[in-house]
Image (cartoon, grey):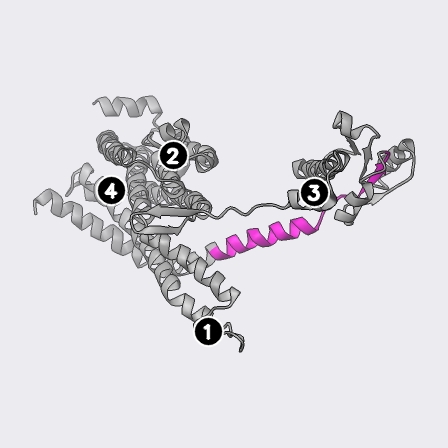
Amino acid sequence: MSENTSKIMTIIKHEYITKVKTKGFIIGTILGPLAIVIVIGAVIVVTMLSMDTGIKKIAVLDRFGKFGSQLVASDTARYYLTDLKESELKDQVRNEEIDGFLILPEDILENNTATVYTRGGGGIGFIESIESSVEHFSRIERLKNAGLNTDVIDIVEKGINIETEKVTEEGVQKDHTEAFAVLGYILGFAIYMFMFIYGSFVSRGVIEEKANRIIEVIASSAKPFEIMMGKVVGIGLVGLTQVLFWILLMFVLAFAGQPLLNSFISEPAIMTPGMMTPEQMEIQAQFGMVKDFLGSGILIGFLFYFLSGYFVYSTIFAAIGSAVDQEQDAQQLMMPVSMLIIIPMLFISVVMTNPDSTVSVILSLVPFFTPILMIVRVAATQVPFWQVALSVVLMIGTFFACIWVASRIYRVGILMYGKKPSIKDLIKWVRL
């Protein structure tokens, strides 16, 4: 091992051990999954509560005289029939006696138009729910007018559940496309958070050492490049340790949790041995999906794109931290870099919805967007090997380019005090 490599390894070891031993890391690693479960559970609870509250009561003035009563019967919590005149209903809306009213005109089937009167607001979902309900009953009425029997209409209105199966070399397997697409969104968001959190750790550490003049002592025995690489890699290993612990926890839950949950669900006496209850079948399906995820390439892709994204952005954050004397001064310089992390989050829903589109392919191959968007595509669809390979090459190349730029800024910035540099100054440092 060369002297330079030895110094980098020493710095890596120091950064890793000091961070891993902190109470914040231990508590965060252990309670992190619990916090995620609590946040997701809170979102679900709030969503469920929002569905039960804030429902606007709408009066229905049925001039058509055919399906107003059916509309009310479909949702008595929202609709009720009225015989009042239109002017009287408008007065009640103005006086806030009612939330609004819906007029079903006599020619609704010919003009395809109904009108809702409110005081405004209610959101997009409010209007869409009314439109969907009226459209449903108007469609049934048209079918009746066309002479179709009500039994035939009931048959036509029945929906279809699409079950997806994946054909592989091993045979036909259950396809979890929708669930994996959502999972891709979660993984992309996780990478987004990790890059911000651990990147800021690097920047903050450099700023603190520079402010306390510790960096001058370190610089007397190691080169700026060695210091930067040791700090970036050391903190990166801290993040990797945390992620691997959570992945290990997923393995334990996936392979040990199923028998435990099954034991709490008793089998009815009429069932023959070996048969499962519907609850047990649902549990088995859910754990099967987790096992499919753990056995797929998504996990490896997540680890690579997390690490590559972290290394690219943390080297930049380290350079910015070296250029300023206090954390407040770093905010202005971090804004352009932060935008590069935020922009892919604006496109993540587009990529998740249509991962094979030209736009999704191009965006996922932009190196600064790749860590977030490519993992979404890998989870949501079968990404061609050449695209994955190209993204790997581009990420590695971008990392070395960022190291070159960041190290030139770092070697000047760590010994520069008293002046708040601009982006123009950073460019000059790179050219030196």
Q: Is residue 47 left or right of residue 210?
A: right
CA distance separating discs 4 and 1:
58 Å
Please give the name of the residue rendered at 41% of the width and 41% of the height, measured from the top-left corner: 380
Q: Label 3: state its secondary structure.
A: helix
Give the labeled residue for mark 2: 330
> Could you say whether the residue bearing mark 4 is in a helix, strand or loop?
helix
Task: Decide if residue 75 is in sight here.
Answer: no
> Picture coordinates of residue 122 (x, y %)?
71, 38
Q: Is residue 3 visible?
A: yes
Q: Was residue 10 drawn as part of the magenta stretch in this picture? A: no
Q: Which residue is mark 4?
A: 215
Residue 417 left/right relative to 328 = left
- Residue 361 falls in image quadrant: top left
Q: Would you place residue 405 above or below residue 226 in this image? A: above
Q: Nearer the viewer, residue 141 or 150?
A: 150
Q: CA distance from mark 1 to mark 3?
A: 45 Å
Residue under label 3, please give it. 153
Category of crowding for the residue at label 2, using alpha-carbon neighbours closer than 10 angstroms: few (below 14), some (14–19), many (at least 20):
many
> Disc 1 vs disc 2: which is toward the camera?
1
For marks 4 and 2, give the CA distance.
17 Å
Magenta-highlighted residues: 37-63
Provide the residue designation for mark 1.
Answer: 263
Closer-to-camera residue (368/365): 365
Assess disc 1: are there few (<14), some (14-19) or many (≥20) residues with their C-alpha within 10 Å of its C-alpha: few
**Is disc 2 placed on a helix, strand or loop?**
helix
Q: Are marks 4 and 2 in contact (CB under 8 Å)?
A: no
